[in-house]
Amino acid sequence: MPTSAQDSIAINDTPYNLQELEKLAWKKLVNGSVKKKNGFRTMCVGTTNDNNTAALRIVVNRKVDEVNKTIYFHTDNRSRKCYDLQKDNRISLLFYDARQRVQIVVKAHATLHTNDALKNDRWKATSPQARLGYMTMEPPNSKSDHPTLGYEERFSTLKPTDIESDLFQENFTVVACAVYELEFLYLDFTGNRKANFFYENSVLQDSFWAVP
């Protein structure tokens, strides 16, 4: 049955009903994980800290499993976000691409992979430059008396070798975010449009249009 104007929205002149829009949302998230210049390459991650307030930071969208509705990013297991997630594994992810005029908000339950095959495989796939973020002598956000890189100054001009960086692999963690809710917002001068999607065990259970 053709999609009617009453139960669809048009994005770049293409009509999308709820089912098609849900597929489009995941396609955009997948593209962000594989295309470095894509607007969904980075996301704002929100956790709940000791004071029961939101703690926000930007991370890189490393992988999206559309089938299992899981989004992955990397972090230092000494970071505050890991501490937060060990106490409360609820996590929010905010994606926004001004060029596409699309905002996607995800709510998920996070699992920390600190010492398993997934963590080891992802570490091997990281570049020497990317590993510098895990090579700091002190945990992230540790107080310093002066501006500091956190790691040895020589690595400001030299890339670490695999042997040098492997010494810090224990600091590396993969965070798997199992999505249970997704909000899709399309911004348009003729009127914004929004839809909500809800999952249980990676299966879509409910969806509806919503007031933007």
Image (spheres, helix red, strand yellow):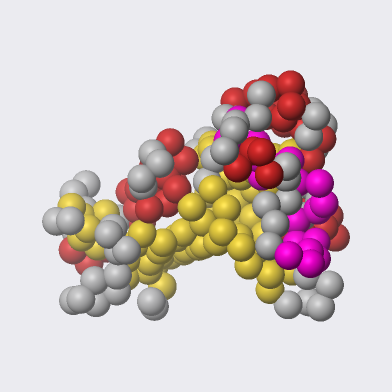
Q: Toward the viewer: 86 or 108?
A: 86
Q: Where is residue 31, by image quadrant?
A: top left
Q: Main secondary structure of the magenta part?
A: loop
Q: Toward the viewer: 72 or 147?
A: 147
Q: Is residue 54 left or right of residue 206?
A: right
Q: Residue at x 68, y 52 (%)?
A: 149
Q: Is residue 192 above or below residue 152?
A: below
Q: Is residue 116 left or right of residue 123?
A: right
Across and down, in percent, residue 175 comes to: 69, 44
Q: Is residue 57 left or right of residue 53?
A: left
Q: Is residue 74 magenta?
A: no
- Taking the image as drawn, is residue 124 in sight? yes
Q: Which quadrant of the rendered structure holds the C terminus? A: bottom left
Q: Where is residue 74, by image quadrant?
A: top right
Q: Residue at x 52, y 46 (%)?
A: 61
Across and down, in percent, residue 111 comes to: 74, 45
Q: Which residues are magenta?
A: 128-146
Q: Is residue 4 above or below residue 202?
A: below
Across and down, in percent, residue 106 comes to: 55, 59
Q: Residue at x 74, y 27 (%)?
A: 164
Across and down, in percent, residue 145 comes to: 79, 67
